[in-house]
Amino acid sequence: MIQGAPLARVAPLLLVLACGLHAQDANGETPDWLRRAQGALSAGEAEAARYSVNALKLKPMGAPENTQMALCLFWMGQFDDAARHTRRALAADGNALAALPVLAQRMPPGDVGPRLNQLALRAEADAELCFLTGALLLVNQDRHRALAFLVRAEELAGADGQAARLSGATGDRAVQRGIAGLRDGQWHDAARSFAFAALDAPGIAEHYTGLAIALAAARDYAAARRMLELAVARYEPDRLLAWVHALRPHEAAGTAGKALAGADAGASDLRLAALLLFAAGRYGAAGEAAVGVLVKDRLDRFAYDVKHYIETRGLKDAAPVNGDSPAGPPPDDATDKPQPTLDDARRHLRRSDFESALKALDPLVREGAEREVFRLLFVALVGRDSMDEAATALQVWWDKAPRDERTRLNALRDLFARAEQFDAWRQRVLAVRAASPNAAIPRLLNTYIELTRGRYVAAREDLVVAKIELGANEMVKALDRLLLEEGFRNDITPDGVPDEPTPRALQGQGDRAFKAGDWQGARRLYLRAAEADAGLPFLTVALLRCDFALGDYAGAYLRLVQLLDEQKVAGGDGRLQLPMVDAYSDAAAYAAHLEALRKTCHEGGANGGIKLDAGAWALYGALRFAEGAFKDAAFALQKWRDFTPDRQPNTGLLKLLETANRRIG
């Protein structure tokens, strides 16, 4: 482990600070210090520090300059100062880190891992270092680990708006996904969603409570206790307990609560047990756990409120299920109807079903909603011929979107399954424009549509009319500046950008991106192909490969379950088609990814702050089974089976376990 920055790296910065800054060279000219600093850092040269400081002197509050300084200081092991400059960069530009390449492209690759490990070890009790760790892990595209550090930073320091923005927190949508995860027993997904919600709105007790339930059900009791403490510090008794009463999580949550409420349990464990048992509808056991807390601590407000809520409402356990798993009576306002998501809205738009898309979007439209909600709302409202409302939604999205998203070619065409559907949708705007040639709104809408088609001349023509009535509008001003830039002078082609490729072509592009090591890019291409044709052969395998390569083992496990069902493994002869290594350009890369999964299984590695058990073992067992390593497969699949005693096991995985044992028998 590196125990501090080498003197050869620290000395240049100390020398610069001691002797003053010289931003000009010998000829009196001002060099491009930022570019020099970036080049020196990527090459591992000691001059990187001096160049970075010179660049920062010229623009002390510049986002690129502070970002470069932060990366240089991180490389040198000066983590506290690196965190400070990271925050300055994000204060100047909230998207300052979004466009950065992975750390290995900004500094010597061999230094990245040791520095991150050193930083992570120091970050446990330091809010700023937790924030820096999370930010750098996001740059390195390690979102699961990043989220754990960002949540820890908020826990240590309270509300942190920069951490919330970095995490991509999604408010109410995240809460709905978290609730769905609790009810399905998908503890990793539930915890991740509630963590997003907590980062987005740190003052709401329900977010920490949902996270505590998910963590406890996953047997991560220490983290669950901390989250419950955060919830209790923020809660309103009637509101929170009514919310928990309506949750009805998977029965495994009640089982975890029962395990916690043992004879030797302390007050903190009994408090957590009371929450889990109450959520699961085991009101008698929840009341007993609350009494146990009060015996140990008469002033425990949460235990008293749980006991009082149960008694005043006369809550009783329902008839036991199999003698052990009583389910509480469903609340009067509870419903099993799934909450709509953005994916639902996208599916409706692909079919040009604009009314259904609006119904799906309606509960998602609120202050603070993610920007994609408003882009889809704009498309749906145009489809319903509500042009004024569409313009409002478009402007809300435009104000939130970064430049590359605003100017992305075929951004609107991507939302439709066929070119004909997109053209029919676009004709609605053109028809309104033709009926009212001097109206600003249809001209503004078509300006953006033409921008996405690469027809910049036509976009400028329509914007001229829009400027007459809407010249003071910020979106109009931004479009005017954009279309005057050199890169937007001429059309891509006379007819605009070509139509998007077919789903099969997208899948082929994804295969090539995967071979090139662009796991994220490949995943995006496969998902676009799936939106157009979910029945493409080997698409599930391709997405499983991407999740596996990215270290998203929970996602890969869900793909595996889907694949077992598609291939009807449970009712077959125990065969599984799961080609993996051939998709890599380098077999060593696959071996490294497989080893990372193996270590996660054996060491209980963290993924988003939750220990992986059944899912990781099942994934490892299936991969080894497909390779013909039946002894390893049988061991891993038996581990999966041992971790799922209280759930209905997947019959496809059971078939693989049976076949592997037979092969080695």
Image: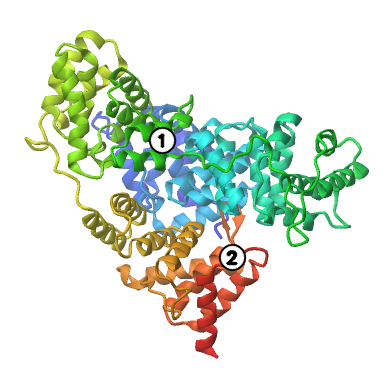
Q: Residue at x 30, y 68 (%)?
A: 585
As drawn, the residue found furthest toward the left would be 494
Q: Quadrant of the C terminus?
A: bottom right
**Residue beneath label 2, please?**
614
Q: Is residue 594 visible?
A: yes
Q: Quadrant of the N terminus?
A: bottom right
Sooner in the amino-acid sequence: mark 1 or mark 2: 1
Using the rendered view, name the quadrant where residue 65 is placed: top left
Image: 460 above or below 305: above
Instruction: From the viewer's perspective, tell me whether residue 443 is left or right of residue 656.
Output: left
Instruction: From the viewer's perspective, tell me whether residue 281 is left or right of residue 357.
Output: right
Image: 592 above or below 256: below
Measuring from the top left, give residue 617's x and y in whole percent. Answer: 55, 69
> Closer to us: mark 1 or mark 2?
2
Tag 1 near tag 2, CB within 8 Å: no
Which label is found at residue 75?
Answer: none
Q: Residue at x 20, y 52 (%)?
A: 502
Three-letter amino acid code at the position of disc 2: Ala
Image: 593 above or below 244: below
Using the rendered view, name the quadrant where residue 308 is placed: top right
Three-letter amino acid code at the position of disc 1: Val
- As helix, strand or loop, the secondary structure at mark 1 comes to helix
- As helix, strand or loop, the secondary structure at mark 2 comes to helix
Q: Residue at x 66, y 46 (%)?
A: 248
Which label is found at residue 53?
Answer: 1
Measuring from the top left, give residue 189's x and y in whole percent. Answer: 55, 50
